[in-house]
Image (cartoon, coloured by chain):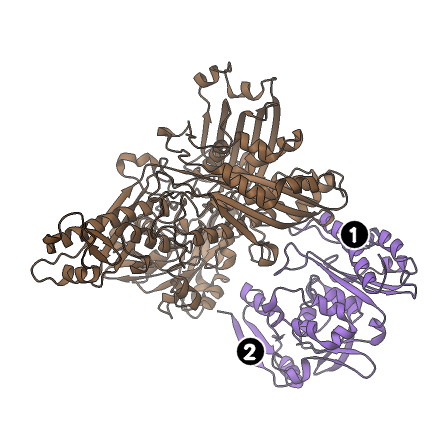
Amino acid sequence: MYDIESLYEATSVEDACRALAEDPQAIVIAGGTDVLVKVRGGKLAGAHLVSIHNLHDELDGVTLADDGTVEIGPITWFHHVTTSPVIQATVPTLGEACDTPGGPQLRVSGTIGGNVCNAATSADSASTLFAYGALLDVVSTRGKRTIPIEEWYAGPGRSYRERDEVLVKIRIPRDHYEGFTGHYFKYGKRRALEIATMGCCCLVKLGADKSTIDDIRLAFGVAAPTPMRATGAEDAVRGLSVAEAVEKIGELAQAETHPRDSWRASKDFRLQLIGEMSRRSLIEAARKGGADI
Amino acid sequence: MEQLREVGRPITRVDAYDKVTGRAKFTDDLCPKPCLEARILHSTIGNGRVVSIDTTEAKKVPGVVAVFTCFDVPDRPYPVAGHPWYADSHAEKRDLADRKLLDDRIRIYGDNIAVVVAEDTVACDRALRKIKVEYEEWPVVYDPKESLKGTEHPVQDIKPDNLVAHTCALTSPENLAKYGYKTVDDAINDPAYHHIAIHTETGEQSQVHIETCTSFCYMEGGKIVCVASTQIPHIMRRVIGQALGIPWGDVRVIKPYIGGGFGTKQDIHYEPLNAWICQQLGGRCVRLELSREELFWDTSGRQPKSFDVEASYGDDMLLHARSIRGWSNTGGYIHHGHALVLNSVNSFRWLYHTNEVASRSEAWTVYTNGPHTGAMRAYGVPEGVWTAECLMGDIAHDNGWDGVEFRLKNCIREGFVDEFTPGGAVAAHTCTLPQCVEKGKEWIHWDEKKREYANQTGPIRHGVGVAFFVYKTAVAPFALETATSRVTLNQDGSVQLQMGATEIGQGADTVFSQMAAEAIGVDTEDVHIVSFQDTDVAPYDAGAYASRQTYVSGTAVKKAGLELREKILAFAHRLYPAAGENLDLRDHAIWDATGRQVCTLASLALEAYYNVDANDQLSAYATANVHTNAIATGCTFADVTVDMPLGKVTVNRIISVQDNGRLINPKLVEQQVHGGMGQSIGFALSEEVQVDPKTGRVLNDTLLDYKIPTMMDLPDLKADFVESDDPTGPYGNKAVGETPIISPAPAIRDAILDATGVKFYHMPMTPQRLVEGFKREGLI
């Protein structure tokens, strides 16, 4: 049995915002794959839940706006992100990342918005959303605001979204993805049902010669208390040939990241992964862009 | 081998349809809900004592029925291991009693100090959070060698120096003298031979059965009924009786289908506490189910162990002498105690003792403030064989010898009798190990792969590896082996089979049915086995462990079956005297010596029940007291890819080839081997209960952080066999259930050594340990 004090099933986003405003203890539940685990574990025992689980009309699905912005409803299942034709045509690396959490069952109950709101550094979609520079729209009875993902995270498992704010849209503008190819590399200790020991997303835009790096984004999960971009490494390899960048990126990324020492993995082991995964992710991303490496 | 009629048929298991359709009833399915729920309050320190407990607020939580603390329960320690009990004539063999229902002396992190009983689990949990405990805290000792130095407060007062047991088996002075040695060390250090010393470590593996440990208790007719997920219902009855201080006959244990045990359920955990709560509450039904998290630290995983090994060997590839010293961490409670590490050091010896002139097998089992540990599949043997195979792999690698050839020259062979076992009962009456090796070698393409994988460079490398294993069958002569079986002829000529031995998912019911059919002369389809054990009616049997049931309980089945067959034929002779002597039962009928049908079995069965003048309800009840043992052997070959910078090992192909004697049901044995191989691959690469040595707390007590392999992590698992007809088994069979978990892990270790040249000694070989090893050797 789950210790849930109350569950309100919202009929609209507006209704959810009202319910969250009225009950100062209320929190949002969508797919439940994080919240219910915390209820069971005692952290959220006695929870007051406002469910947005059924707000499909407002919050589910992926669309492409006229200006080329990819718009993802937060209660879209991981699996539906992966299989969305819009995602595959525009930000396929995000689709690949969303194909890695847990197993098939989890990916048809867990949502991409939940993954963002849970704010874990290990979230599989996080590093890719970071690399794509996602914009996160939240609403409450106080109004609507947009938080760029770089400003979303307050610490491990914490975001700057207020308790009563509902994430209503994840947006990726056209210039954030156009011309980029990418790779998400999830390192787990096994091949499924796994939380990332390290997650790395690399997006590259190659020059016309297909061997120069015109632009690059390198983002990590678990390399720090929150997901992060290694902008120093990006700056250092921008303009280099792919081969040179591959040579350098591992050490550059290691120098810029701050993984912790824990019983799950030592700092040294994580640094080893950061170096190796940066290299391999860059190679994969560049290959997809046509580089011969 | 002589072809048998029912034994050897690869039939579908008798419970298959019920299990896959969900009709099979497990403990929780039978629970009369709503009933009371009980949850345990666990200590948040790893060593010390409870000074006081305040339950005032907890008792006010709506729905709470009672809160009992360590100060409320009887001060009566009891033993919990799934071992046979012993009569007064052998009282020294009884297990130590070192547990109480709840205890104010805290020995491990999470120890049991109170229990809440409520109308539902939410109320239980709310109440648990409101209990206030005052502790006196003492330093935690997790390292067994540290613990042996003595602690201010012994973990258990019955062992003031924290030493549970110490044993040492040495080659006798007379045997040493034949080779001019005074001590085993003289043989090991003889300068005429090469010398090697290694240190190995094996972690705590958890069983991770699907069904958690669960029970519900109620009183009926003045007796306590406990329905429980257990491998050992009769032992559970005894332990509940001992723990509550009531006659064992006042306890009735019912064991339905169970969702796996792998040794966890060869211990008694919370069933006595649950029975006691039930008793306190006037016999109301109380359910006590452990959470998945509790299973990781509050039931007994595989004992963590370390070993120091020395050996000498000659240029002729023959082992000259070996010594193994093992230390086992039993945690805060003894549970299965010293038997486990004894199995480790003994199996180390048995596997490669053939040419040795000297041998030492020494072992210590130590109390610490670590999680209590106990039985897990293969019971200490995987750790001993891991160590034996680390040694063999290193010697072959260092000398450039072929690992298969080197092992074959030294391995156990037919006729082996363990000189250290009283009466020589541990023996290889049969041994097809060389043929098993031949099969495995061919399948993996050993010679080709060895050539192909030589002289690799680069970060990603390939290797092949091998490991052999031995496993003794059942527990004689070290412990009591007894089993009873009852067979009854039904009115329609079918047969009712009742066992004290338990089906725990391994397929016992199916092979018992096959053996009964073979003995009686009917078809397996005519045998109705009663799967549930109810200690009020089920014959006595110690239960499912030690790969014993097909061997020991099977002997009882055969005995009872043959007896029933004789009774059927004698009854037929009484009814139809004209048919003469030497009647036969086959094809559902009775036949005379000339081959003429006397009557059908069904008509005879009707006569047996309803003949007005001469009915004789036919049944047989037979006990087998088994004193023999039989060594099963086999090997695993593995082909791996090692991605060194990422510390990733991919098992590409793997085969286990085993000599399990005659296979009662080849399909079921194959499935056992598949399961064991998967579990061994997990132990090799990822499965380990991680303990914080400072607090004794288990860190990874979830299925997320305790890494059992998924289907995605396992290659196709290949199982093969070379059968033998062991003279001691009821139908030539030897141990099966535990054997497959032994050799895959060391074979993977050997393949990693082949691929990279790096020697790993610490199991599991997790990615982090691999990366550290490759860095140490300068490979990355």
Between residue B501 and residue A124, name the one nearer to us: B501
> Which residue in the structure is indicated by mark 1?
A275
Q: Furthest-left residue in view?
A: B613
Please report the residue visible at 45 percent of the width from the left and 59 percent of the height from the top. Answer: B211
Relative vertical location of residue B439 with respect to residue A102 in this rendering, above or below? above
Q: Chain B is drawn in which colour?
A: brown
Q: In this view, does B639 lie to the left or right of B270?
A: right
- Residue A7: which disc? 2
Kind of residue indicated by mark 1: Gly
**Residue at 84%, 72% in the rendered image:** A178
* Disc 1, SS: helix
Q: Which chain is purple?
A: A
Vertical relation: A63 (above or below) B575: below
Mark 2 to mark 1 CA distance (whole Å): 45 Å
Q: Is residue A289 among the parts visible in the rendering?
A: yes
Q: Quadrant of the N terminus of chain B?
A: top left
Q: Mark 1 lies on which chain?
A: A
Q: Name which residue lies at 91% across and 57% down.
A: A241
Mark 2 / mark 1, whichever is N-terminal: 2
| Residue B576 percent across, percent down from the top left | 11, 55
- Which quarter shows the C terminus of chain B? top right
